[in-house]
Amino acid sequence: MDWFWWVFIFFMAGGFAKVVDAARTALRTRHERKMERLETARQERQELAAAHKPPEPVCGCTHHLAKHDKRGKCHERVEVAVVWDEDHRPVQYEAGQCTCQQYIGPQPLSQIYAEDLTDLA
């Protein structure tokens, strides 16, 4: 029964609270580290998925190559400012034609020509 008094004195002196606080801190740290590992794994999956996608053929006007004709003219509709306030900020917009004339971006593989490396003759 002598051990009972030591446990009682330890409990009354606040020692049990320190043990619980240490355990709570350890669990919180473990949780934070696990969340960091999960976030890192999620970012790695996103980066790998982005690395395996081919480049998007996007023009300088931010429209896709499919919106341009063979001559490079863009056929996408955009908002064009028609009325401005005294600080030269647009107030009113109307639908208009995109004025882009040239495609700037990665060339699709079907349009790239590579000469033969060996002479067959």
Image: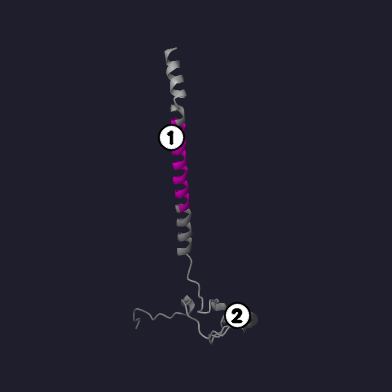
Asked if 29 appears above or below 96 in the picture, the reply is above
Q: Quadrant of residue 51?
A: bottom left
Cα distance between the residues tagged 2 and 1: 60 Å
The x and y percentages for residue 73 are 55, 85
Q: Residue at x 44, y 20 (%)?
A: 9
- Which dot marks residue 22? 1
Q: Is residue 55 above or below residue 4?
A: below
The C terminus appears in which quarter of the rendering?
A: bottom left
SS for dot 2: strand
For label 1, count other residues whose C-alpha is less than 10 Å away and answer few (under 14), some (14-19) or many (20+). Answer: few
- Most common SS among magenta residues: helix
Q: Amino acid at mark 2?
A: Pro
Q: Nearer the viewer, residue 102 or 53?
A: 102
Residue 30 colored magenta? yes
Check residue 34 in the rendering and tell me which mark sits there, or answer none: none
Of mark 2 and mark 1, the one earlier in the sequence is 1
Q: Is residue 105 above or below residue 6?
A: below
Residue type (three-letter) at the residue carrying disc 1: Ala
Q: Which residues are magenta?
A: 18-39
Asked if marks 2 and 1 touch (Cβ < 8 Å), the reply is: no
Q: Is residue 116 left or right of residue 56?
A: left
The residue that label 2 is drawn on is: 90
| 54 or 61: nearer the viewer | 61
Looking at the image, can residue 73 be seen? yes
Q: Identify the residue at horizontal 47%, vertical 36% (top origin).
A: 24
